[in-house]
Amino acid sequence: MLSFITLISVSTLLARNAQTSLAASYGLVKDYSGDNFFDGWDFFNGYDSTTSGDEMYVGPQAAAEAANLAFIDPQTKHAFLKVDNTTNVPDQQKRNSVKITTTASYDVGSVWVADLFHVPYGCGLWPAMWSWAPQVGLNWPEGGEIDTFEAVNQVSFNQMGLHTNAGCTAPKPNPNQNSASIVNTTDCHGDQGQGCIVTDAGHPSDGPGFNDNGGGVFVTEYAATGISIWYIPRANVPQSISSNSTTIDTSTLGTPTGNWPASSCGSNGFSGFFLPQSIVFHIVLCGTFGKATYNQTCTPGDCYSTSVVGDGSNLSEGYFEIGSVRVFSSNVTGSTSSGSSNPTSGGSSSGTGTGSSTASASQGSSTSGAFQNDATWSLVVAAFIAVIGCLAM
């Protein structure tokens, strides 16, 4: 514990005097918002075995809307994605939920800004907003993965990270990262390790502390020089974002909450490690991560029988409320686009009537690829439990 605290202290001292150099100006290429929010998203349909969850995803869009799992609020024009919390689910059955993926993928030199007013929270829930390269299919983590938001059960802080093929690491300490952030793990290899994970210990970035204060904005920058993620609480969202500007300059956002320099992947940077990214929202029930960490923040017991089976009233907080997801590119000077875009083409419709992108079933959660062997999963749980213990002290 002493060595762990010492590392955090060193990181704090360095970060306080550091300036973030990974910044650029970007112009708007896609605006997912309002009544047209779901235009350009594929709805996964069926069971996603990669997370070993206790949910059944409902798609295509019309089916999810009919089940009241996806809708646009007529007053606020916010998009809602939710887990079913009204059906009485019997033992041995799964509960309905949603997983959506952008049909377009966004290449290096992109920024996506997610304005979230509410995130899923509660025992049995494993929500995430992340991105990956669906064209790689079962070869994940080839093409890389960026986790912008990931939480589990009743944890009140967000964890973010990268998953790559072998060869990328995260610096520890990192002077280009907020001093309150904790570097949990440094090996980004998603197939053999738990990825390079950073915990946002500086804000209530999940749960009641997030939802009761109106949420906030997550900014993900996928640049040639590095990947950075900012979490900005609602009260601190700058005018440049709240005004729906057609440009964004990341140099105005301050030190990132999480940062992974491209130089950590070797002399060629992200080349060979990352491909164009499609953005994903999902709400897993229990799953590998949720089950293994359930007793850390919930009344000890079995995740499935306690939180999934039954009338679902315990899952009333299991929903995303999304104001918008806006994507910017360094190749554009700035022009509004609400129904068209010029991103890199992403996965096409699978043709199976599921509404999911091609190969989207081949990799689910932001950490599910790492969970395919027991030794790796043990590392993930151990790191997660260690962070919870430190934050609780």
Image (spheres, helix red, strand yellow):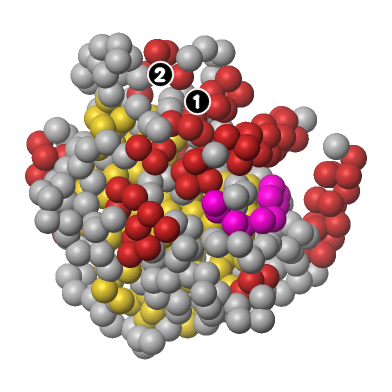
Task: From the top left corner, tell me how far across and down residue 106 is, in percent.
Answer: 36, 72
Magenta: main secondary structure: loop
Name the residue that disc number 2 marks.
304
Q: Position of residue 322 (x, y in %)?
A: 32, 50
* Quadrant in which residue 307 is drawn: top left
Q: Is 180 within the magenta?
A: no
Q: Is residue 124 found left or right of 225 in the rendered image?
A: left
* Labelled disc at residue 291: 1
Contact between marks 2 and 1 (CB within 8 A): the answer is yes
Q: Amino acid at mark 2?
A: Tyr
Three-letter residue code for mark 1: Lys
Q: Position of residue 117 (x, y in %)?
A: 38, 46
Vertical order, 46 against 34 (above or below): above
- Badge 1 marks a residue whose secondary structure is helix
The answer to whether any part of residue 150 appears in the image is: no
Comes first in the chain, label 2 or label 1: 1
Q: Secondary structure at mark 2?
A: helix
- CA separation in Å, label 2 and label 1: 8 Å
Numbered marks: total: 2
Q: Which residues are magenta?
A: 182-191
For disc 2, the neighbor class at 10 Å (few under 14, some 14 to 19, many from 20) is many
Q: Nearer the viewer, residue 379 or 23?
A: 379
Q: Quadrant of residue 316?
A: top left
